[in-house]
Amino acid sequence: QVQLVQSGAEVKKPGASVKVSCKASGYIFTNYYIHWVRQAPGQGLEWMGWINPNSGGTNSAQKFQGWVTMTRDTSIDTAYMELTRLKSDDTAVYYCARGIFAGAGSQDGFDIWGQGTMVTVSS
Amino acid sequence: SYELTQPPSVSVSPGQTARIICSGDALPKRYAFWYQQKSGQAPVLVIYEDNKRPSGIPERFSGSSLGTMATLTISGAQVEDEADYYCYSTDISGNHGGVFGGGTKLTVL
């Protein structure tokens, strides 16, 4: 079945970087955008950006530009999100999610979600 | 930056109709998507492209959009529908990025 499986929980110190992986299975990886969304404890959902696994093209929310890097490895059907210069308020669950329609662009929503990766930033 | 606005909370009795509104200036030109999130779980898509329901989502969930407002309607809300609901859409300016509404806590009791 179609699923996204994310890497495990991370604990990082302020100023460090974290890289979260998202492995896709059950569909053609390069046909659907992968979005990244985060949720701080007790807070709402925050869209971070997307990657087009086919071209490698990315787009991120202005807040995260210059600070988040989204990449992919098509040989292993895996997308990555790296966040640098971590601060305590980056403590959150980070989700990857798949675009709804094959070949759709950036205006598409997303339907399949990973299980989430908890990233804790603490000294 | 672009914003989508939702009421923080909505409360209904079981069997009543719940309506959650999402407002945003770009909604006349962009689809709205709705997500349900229960405590400790990943979100679930319940409505896409304003008014389409994914397979497996109960018929009591419906969506509509008119002008700058999109509405999620739950007809005959059930206790199990109690959750946080988020609208999502994309901007028509800037880098056309995505944005979520602040979320609405639906209480059914």
Image (tube, coloured by chain):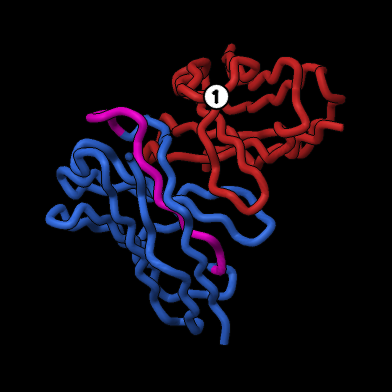
Three-letter residue code for mark 1: Ile
**How many residues crowd mark 1 within 10 Å: few (<14), some (14–19), many (20+)?**
few
In the image, residue B15 lies in the stretch drawn in magenta: no
In the image, residue A94 lies in the stretch drawn in magenta: yes
Looking at the rendering, in which quadrant would you find the N terminus of chain A?
Answer: top left
| In the image, residue A65 above or below residue B56 | below
Q: In which quarter of the image is residue A70?
A: bottom left
| In the image, residue A100 above or below residue A97 | above
The colour applied to the residues of chain B in this rendering is red
Of all residues shown, which one is farthest toward the bottom?
A123
Chain letter of disc 1 in the image: B
Q: Name the residue under label 1.
A: B57
Residue A5 x %, y % = 37, 55
Looking at the rendering, in which quadrant would you find the C terminus of chain A?
Answer: bottom right
Residue A65 shows up from this direction? yes
Question: In front here: A22 or A64?
Answer: A22
Chain in blue in the render: A
Q: Give the range drawn in magenta.
A: A91-105
The residue shown at (38%, 59%) is A6
Question: In front here: B12 or A27?
Answer: A27
